[in-house]
Amino acid sequence: MDRVGFVGLGLMGKPMAKRVLSHGYGLTVFNRSRGPVEELARLGAYPASSLKEVAEKSDVVITMLPDEPDVRQVVLSLGEALGQGSVVVDMSTISPFTVRELHDFLSERGVEMLDAPVSGSTMAAESGTLTIMVGGSRDVFERVLPVLRTMGRTISYMGGAGMGAFTKLCNQVLVSVNLLATCEALLLASKAGLDLGKVIEVVGSGAAGSWQLSNLGPRMVARDFRPGFKVQHLRKDLRILRSVAERMGLPLLGTSLVAELVKVLDERGRGLEGTQALITVLEELAGHRIS
Ligand SMILES: NC(=O)c1ccc[n+]([C@@H]2O[C@H](COP(=O)([O-])OP(=O)(O)OC[C@H]3O[C@@H](n4cnc5c(N)ncnc54)[C@H](OP(=O)(O)O)[C@@H]3O)[C@@H](O)[C@H]2O)c1
């Protein structure tokens, strides 16, 4: 597992690939636009010009791509070119049912697959402290673990194919509902004339604390909407969550509410901003701006 390929060098993939490279692995990289490929090449990675080339030069290929069609297209292409016994590790957030389809497709060709989505921001990707939740064969998990350790601090095996993706969806329920709660709490605090920084600090240190409140709350107050996690990716995750819940006969009421609000935000052209921009929709409904 010493020859690693990395496909998808965006906000998350680029720092993750740099971590793998800095731990001495021979790394082959590929991305749709060439800028990040050239940046990684300057650090010592091999700049592949096709997915076929990535497959030929790698024992394990990591994918970190935006949405399901991208993962499907890349994994199907890799599957045609990868050697028997090699492994695809998809770290994007996609549906567990799509994971299972891709897992079966690869399995028929003698290629293994792990679903290993991550939790944590671009900062966690840079510092190698991501939480990684893994589905697939335990044996394959053990073989790939040293590579995952270069990127994550908490790395957990969750069960067979798709169980990493299911765990990530649980994560996204909590992320989205806490995001809405953060917006509502800041609106109330602002209307009441409270010091917003102090509210974030005080309630954040008690039972109401959350990553969304302590990390995105200050950015909402500062009106810093630069992306760590893009609105369009949260919209995608909520779309997946709703379709998975529908398929499982499960009502997800709070999550569905956030999905509608995030859709409005994206339709307003704010899809490339960070998810903290949700405050702008809530401000409009309230007729009140927090800062
Ligand atoms: N950002 C976060 O905080 C975060 C946290 C946890 C999980 N995630 C999940 O991780 C995944 C990636 O997120 P991200 O924020 O890194 O996304 P991103 O910034 O949009 O990066 C995606 C990268 O994939 C490349 N790409 C797209 N289609 C491709 C293809 N067919 N072949 C090769 N490269 C392709 C893009 O290339 P271009 O340069 O041409 O656009 C881009 O560099 C998503 O599923 C997201 O939901 C994100």
Image: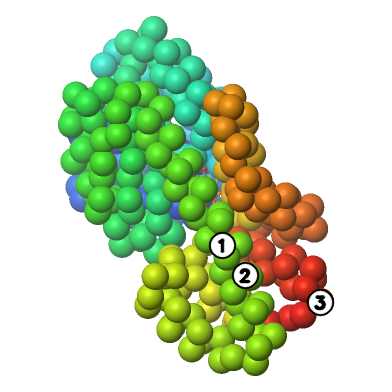
Relative depth, front residue between 274 and 3: 274
Question: What amino acid does circle 3 point to?
Answer: Gly
Instruction: Give the residue pinned by disc 3.
Output: 287
Cα–Cα span, label 1 and label 3: 19 Å
Quarter of the image where the C terminus is located: bottom right
Q: Nearer the viewer, residue 252 or 136?
A: 252
Tell me the tag on residue 183: 2
Amino acid under label 1?
Leu
Residue 41 in view (yes/no): no
Q: Residues within 10 Å of mark 2 (few under 14, many from 20)?
A: many
* Residue in the foreground of this view, choosing between 149 and 137: 137
The count of marks equals 3
Residue occupied by mark 1: 179
Which residue type does callout 2 highlight?
Cys
Label 3 crowd (10 A; few <14 / some 14-19 / many >=20) = few
Q: Quadrant of the N terminus?
A: top left
Q: Provide the secondary structure element on which disc 2 rests.
A: helix
